[in-house]
Image: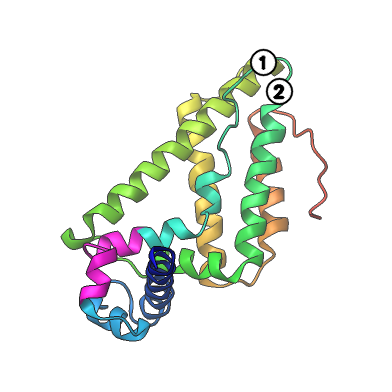
Amino acid sequence: MARRTKEDAQATRTALLDAAERVFQQRGVSRTSLNEIAQAAGVTRGGLYWHFKDKAALFNAMMERVTLPLETALTGVAEDCTDLCDPVAALRAGLMHALRQIARDPQTRRVLQIATMMVEHTEELGPVRDRHLQSQRDSVRRLHAALECAARLENVALPAPVEHLANGMHATMHGLVYNWLLEPSFDLEATGLTTLNVFLRGIGLTPTISTSNKG
């Protein structure tokens, strides 16, 4: 019986997260009530609160269910900066994997559209903004480490403070993804690869993996 209860609870949670994706995309996050999500999921309001204490908790769980590509692309990059690692190749491979997932996986694309275009950072959604800011800081920190490591191993003097370059690369990739989500009128993977190559060469680093967009 306990196993059955656990399975039922997981099914309810999944139904709520599925409904949140649908309703948030249709109405926007601020204009959606928890009652509307509960109704869309066929769950009582009490059942929803058993899983999520408020809208921000539900939203963040929806985000975390999908492995967000640009949040995880650089995990592990340059954490062990030695002569045996290639931080430029790891950085490019991670970012290209992220762009490929965004371009090819409908759920990832849907959740990113909600997160970037349908959220108002109101007081009610303060934890959502906090999560977004922490994710951004983590990504910039990893970029900083990768660029710094690559410059050291290649014996390159970077043309600007590494902090500026890391923030610039992060903003460039997020801007590219945002524009594509707004109107997917260009090839995200090919454009992303070109952008990465130009950026890296522009700061004196050598892209060392294939320029092919296949995979």
150 lies left or right of 64: right
Whole-angstrom CA distance, mark 2 to mark 1, is: 6 Å
Q: Secondary structure at mark 1?
A: loop
| Quarter-of-image position of residue 191 | bottom right
Residue 24 vs residue 118, the one in the foreground: 24
Residue 79 at what x, y percent from top left?
A: 57, 24
124 lies left or right of 59: left
Q: Does the residue at mark 2 contact the one at mark 1 (Cβ under 8 Å)?
A: yes
Q: Quadrant of the C terminus?
A: bottom right
Q: Residue at x 54, y 41 (%)?
A: 169
Q: Which residue is mark 2?
A: 85
Magenta-tinted stretch: 46-60
Residue 161 at what x, y percent from top left?
A: 48, 24
Is residue 61 in sight in this rendering? yes
Majority secondary structure in the magenta region: helix
Residue 64 vs residue 27, the one in the foreground: 64
How many numbered dots are placed on residues in this image?
2
Amino acid type indicated by mark 2? Cys
**The stretch drawn in magenta includes residue 59:** yes
Amino acid type indicated by mark 1? Thr
Q: Secondary structure at mark 2?
A: loop
Q: Which residue is mark 1?
A: 82
Q: Residue furthest left?
A: 123
Residue 171 vs residue 107, the one in the foreground: 107
Q: Residue at x 48, y 39 (%)?
A: 139
Instruction: Note whether 186 is above or below 128 in the view shown.
Output: below
